[in-house]
Amino acid sequence: MKTVCFTGHRDVKITRELKNRLMATLETLIQNGCTDFYAGGAVGWDMLCEAAVLALRKKYTGIRLHLILPCTFSEQTKAWKDEQKLLLSLIRVFADGEEYVSDRYYNGCMKLRNEKLVFYADCCVCYYNKKSPCGTGQTVRMATAKGVEIFNLAE
C-alpha cells in the first residue's frame, strides 16, 4: 500500500480532536509505506488533509501531495470566499503536482475528479457521515468497489 486518496464533506466541523486523529492516521499510513497522497482541492475535509500532508513533510521528507482538481483554479473557486481561495493557492504552491480533469466546470467534472482519486488510491482516508447522498458517499462507494481500504474518521 503506497497511495492514499482523501474524500470528505465540505462542512466538516474541524476540532483539535479531529486534527489529532487525522495526523495519527496519516503517520500510521506513512510508517506503513504510504508515500503519495491524492486530494481534490475542495473546501473543508480536502483542505484539512492537504494541510496535514504538507505539515507532515517536515518530518517525513519522502511523502508527496498530488492535487487532482475538477477544473481550473478560477473555475473551481468562483463562488469561494477570499480566504478559501488563498488557502488553496498556498496548497498549490507546495503540492508536488496538480492535474485537472477539465479546463472548465461542468456537471460531472467533480465525479470525474473523484474517479481519478480512487483510480490512484490503495486506501482512502475520508470523513463520511452517511447522512445524505453526496459526492463523498459516491467516492467511498467507488473506492469500496475497487477494494480500496477505507479509514472513515467520521466514525
Image (cartoon, grey):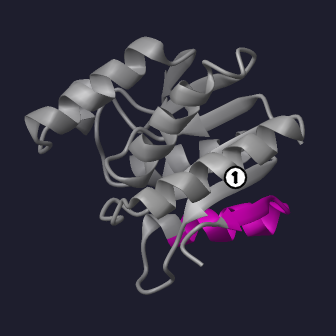
Check if residue 149 falls in the magenta segment.
yes
Residue projecting furthest to the bottom: 131
Residue on which the image places disc 1: 25
Residue shown at the point (40%, 42%) measured from the top left: 47
x and y percentages locating residue 77 in the rendered image: 20, 36
Residue drawn at (42%, 57%) of the image: 16
Few, some or many residues within 10 Å of mark 1 (<14, 14–19, 20+): some
Looking at the image, residue 31 sits to the left or right of residue 130; the answer is right
The residue positioned 50% from the left and 21% from the top of the image is 98
Task: Determine the main secondary structure of the stretch shown in magenta.
Answer: helix
Residue 80 in which image quadrant: top left
Q: Quadrant of the C terminus?
A: bottom right
Percent from the top left, x then y, of residue 138? 55, 69
Q: Secondary structure at mark 1?
A: helix
- The reply to whether residue 72 is visible in this rendering is no
For image coordinates 28% across by 40% down, the residue present is 105
Q: Is residue 44 above or below residue 139?
A: above
Q: Amino acid at mark 1?
A: Thr
Residue 126 in percent (x, y) is at 58, 60
Between residues 32 and 119, which one lies in front from this camera angle?
A: 32
Which of the two residues, 140 or 88, is positioned nearer the viewer here?
A: 88
User: Which stretch appears magenta?
Assistant: 137-151
Nearer to the camera, 112 or 7: 7
